[in-house]
Image (cartoon, rainbow, N blue to C red):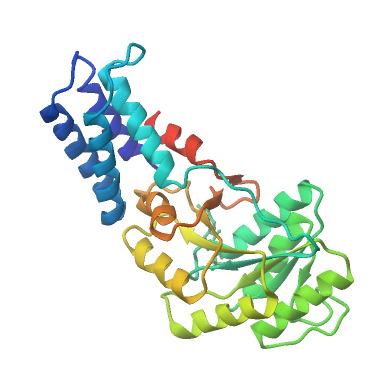
Amino acid sequence: MFGTLSDRLTSTFKNLRSKGRLTESDIDGTVRQIRRALLDADVAVPVVREFTGRVRERALSAEVSGALNPAQQVVKIVNDELVGILGGESRALNFAKTPPTVIMLAGLQGAGKTTLAGKLAKHLREQGHTPLLVAADLQRPNAVTQLQVVGERAGVPVYAPHPGIASEAEVPTGDPVEVSRGGVTEARAKLHDVVIIDTAGRLGVDQELMRQAADIREATQPDEVLFVIDAMIGQDAVNTAKAFLDGVDFTGVVLSKLDGDARGGAALSVASITGRPILFASTGEQLTDFEPFHPDRMASRILD
Ligand code: GDP
């Protein structure tokens, strides 16, 4: 995903290699190139401003170190600051003290929620958990069926508003809040220790969507609300993420479609804009294309 950005940063650093000492104007030139590379990669403007400001300040005040030449020093500063905007430390899922742990997924339609639900369910099952998927996306035709297909692939049952398919229990139809609540009750009764609720998205942010998601949150009191964002959406990432933060609030972010060849600015902006950590990355359509997110590894990948 970050091919172009990586190339541009690398060539910026290459220009510094022959320098024995960096003048203020060398640093300013470098920071300008970094700024342009980040903006061209669709990183949100305020994030770029803060990032380059900090890189400049640190580069200007960097001690001359015996171990690192000036170019290496700048690379190290950029690396540290990239780790910072990606959230700093990696963070694992929070589990409830008393099961079931409830994980709610939110995001725009097409962001990759349903796919992620399957990936997360499989990942948790492999770690010895007994997840239950809950089909609370009743908006999109086929969303329930899609979750059932994904659940089958992941080897995880699905609680869905279609009697006889997912559950012997009476499953409420029509109301996503009731389905979500029912899913948590079902998990408690059948001793599933994690519940993953797939919620509806819209093509654009709208009030009804936000209200529904907020109602599901209220009804199920999730331990995690994960905002799934398509890493390819560019500058829209800022407004979308802010709208979900205000409308539903969320505890963590999942970046999806990190395998794409778009510029990936969303991936580099969302943690910084929202102050919420990125927990996972989704990197393809298969259930195995999924990994816990580590800011330091992502920064190294970009600067490789
Ligand atoms: P939802 O509307 O948020 O539930 O999104 P879906 O899970 O249905 O995903 C929308 C489309 O994106 C589907 O065609 C998925 O196969 C695809 N998709 C989801 N995650 C990824 C990913 O990480 N990489 C790629 N390349 N495609 C993905």
| Whole-percent x, y for residue 216 in the image | 63, 79
**Above/below status of 274 relative to 291:** below
Left or right: 88 in relation to 225: left
Q: Residue at x 41, y 72 (%)?
A: 243
**Above/below status of 273 relative to 108:** above
State the residue in front, 274 or 43.
274
Instruction: Name the quadrant where ligand 1 sits.
Output: bottom right
| Whole-percent x, y for residue 17 in the image | 24, 17
Position of the N terminus by quadrant: top left
Left or right: 55 in relation to 273: left
Picture quarter containing residue 169? bottom right
Q: Residue at x 49, y 57 (%)?
A: 276
Q: Residue at x 60, y 82 (%)?
A: 215
Q: Residue at x 52, y 61 (%)?
A: 228
| Whole-percent x, y for residue 295 in the image | 49, 41
State the residue in front, 119 or 153.
119
Left or right: 90 in relation to 8: right
Position of the C terminus by quadrant: top left
| Whole-percent x, y for residue 107 in the image | 51, 68
Can residue 265 be seen here? The reply is yes
Can residue 140 be seen here? The reply is no
Picture quarter containing residue 138? bottom right
